[in-house]
Image: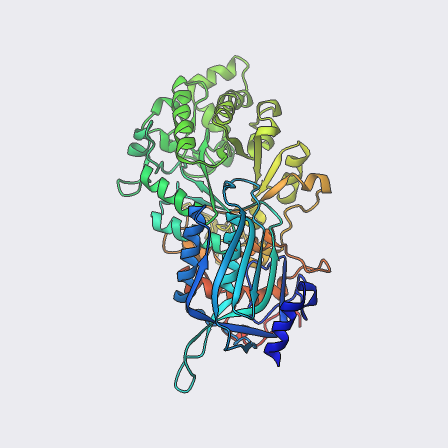
Amino acid sequence: MATLLLRLLFLLGSPATLLTCAAAGASFPVNVWPKPTSMSWAEPHAAVPVSPSFHIVASSGNPYLVSAAERYAKLLFKEMYRPIVRPAVNVTAGNALETLTLAVSDLAAPLQHGVDESYTLEILPTGAATVTAVTAWGAMRGLETFSQLSWRAGGRGRGRGRDLLLVAAGVRVEDRPLYPHRGLMLDTGRTYFPVSDILRTIDAMAANKMNVFHWHITDSQSFPIVLPSEPSLAEKGAYGEDMKYTVEDVKRIVEFAMSRGVRVVPEIDSPGHTASWAGAYPEAVTCAGKFWLPDGDWNRRLAAEPGAGQLNPLAPKTYEVITNVVNDLTSLFPDGFYHAGADEVTPGCWQADPTIQADLERGGTLSQLLERYVSAVHPLVVSRNRTAVFWEDVLLDAAVNVSTSLIPPATTILQSWNNGANNTKLIVQAGYRAIVSSASFYYLDCGHGDFVGNNSIYDDPNSDYKADGGSWCGPYKTWQRVYDYDIAYGLTPEEAQLVIGGEVAMWTEQVDTAVLDGRVWPRASAMAEALWSGNRDASGRKRYAEATDRLIDWRQRMVGRGVRAEPIQPLWCRTRPGMCNAVQ
């Protein structure tokens, strides 16, 4: 009778006829992360077996979508996910799912900022399923949702019956992201990560419906990318021969990301954070090789952290090199954004250079030096048909900044990282689009103590060192801290329109291959949901309590997919709903 009822519901009407429709805070026996905008699952909840001959039907008009269809079809059978709590569903044994059909209206739509990622997924109890989307990239999001509605049942131990691959049936999902920019920044300048780590990270991003891999490629510590026009930068600036990214590596990463609907935005930070350029071009870098903190005095620092060196805006070689760098990077990376950095320009480093000292004595200023540099770099980036992205410092730094006339809002995006919502508001009030990466919420490196050695601050037998544990941005940002942040907090509706999204940032002074996954996941998943469907239920209440069990389940599935995500609770909690809450 239940099977007949389910069939009739889908034959007779629209989603409004379904017996249950997910409110923004509702959970189901099996859930999707990030939570869809709208999901309906008819009651009594049912599932159908997946046929051994199951296949995904996709048009050949988009090779990336064809690749995704093949990948998800294999994943469905390869994945051995078994929910911690057995789903309470009726299994409709007579109607195995044979096909998932992808219906896309614009196969040629390029992967770029603002592309339509919406989709609708229907899984009928009659053994058919469809993803309908405007673009191939939206269809990929629908494929991921479909994969998360499948699971294994039975087949464990004697008398448990045969192993079944099941998928939820009687389901309709209508989904689209709140924000078009949902990113992860990975720093490969301080720590080199093998290409396999980067690919695994991008794959996990796609599974979380994140769509921007912000690759902070270089920093003061190393210059690991081999550029055709400037090979000496990597030759002299990389950690070693086996710690370089070749042109072939870059192409592989970009193509891999494209096949998952993830854009790759390159960043070559400058003019600060460029000590690694000094091996190739010592004449273009000021204060290189000097101790970063003379006499331990922060006010006399030459850099924000060990590794002093900044490009000299007065040196002709600076512009020759940066022109080649920008041209090479925009040739290697097809995305419409180019991140030009410009954070943490340290006055002491420039002031230590004799040519700059002479310029300052003639009445010049540090801000004029930065303006000279930016006035060359910004037009260069724009001439390559790119939008220039800078860290907020270029506008908001108190000591060294530039005039807004040099970074027109029409061709410039600013990325916030200091002072929480305050700096985001300052950015949008100035008319700029903003990417939010507030260190108070989205910096995943925070809370592990300072990495500098010979540090007496910890030599206190009576207590820990302050509440931050010695980390400048401590304490550690828990997944709930990440999840609960509203990136448009304190903005007017008009100002909020200029916030295009956010990025969690993985700075890597204390991160390498051994710990990468656990530092990133599942905390990045928390941001992924907040920026995809929000962090509130239909009544406007924060839904972190309801999200906990879902994130435990999602983390378990990610681990099964080869991502070493850290746990957020003991399994005991997942099997005893509500018992691990702070408030009952």
Q: Residue furthest front?
A: 11
Residue placed most toward the observer, 62 or 365: 62
Which residue is located at x 36 percent, y 56 percent?
514
Which residue is located at x 36 percent, y 40 percent?
251
Residue placed most toward the observer, 515 or 118: 118
Question: Where does residue 465 sit, x and y in percent of width and height?
Answer: 52, 53
Which residue is located at x 67 percent, y 40 percent?
497
- In the depicted structure, whether residue 177 falls above or below residue 547: above
Residue placed most toward the observer, 550 or 484: 550
Question: Where does residue 183 sit, x and y in percent of width and height?
Answer: 52, 46
Q: Residue furthest top?
A: 362
Is residue 361 left or right of 189 when viewed as pictured? right
Q: Quadrant of the N terminus?
A: bottom right
Residue 240, image quadrant = top left
Question: Where does residue 369 sit, x and y in percent of width and height?
Answer: 51, 21
Question: Where does residue 141 sit, x and y in percent of width and height?
Answer: 52, 54
Q: Can you see residue 287?
A: no
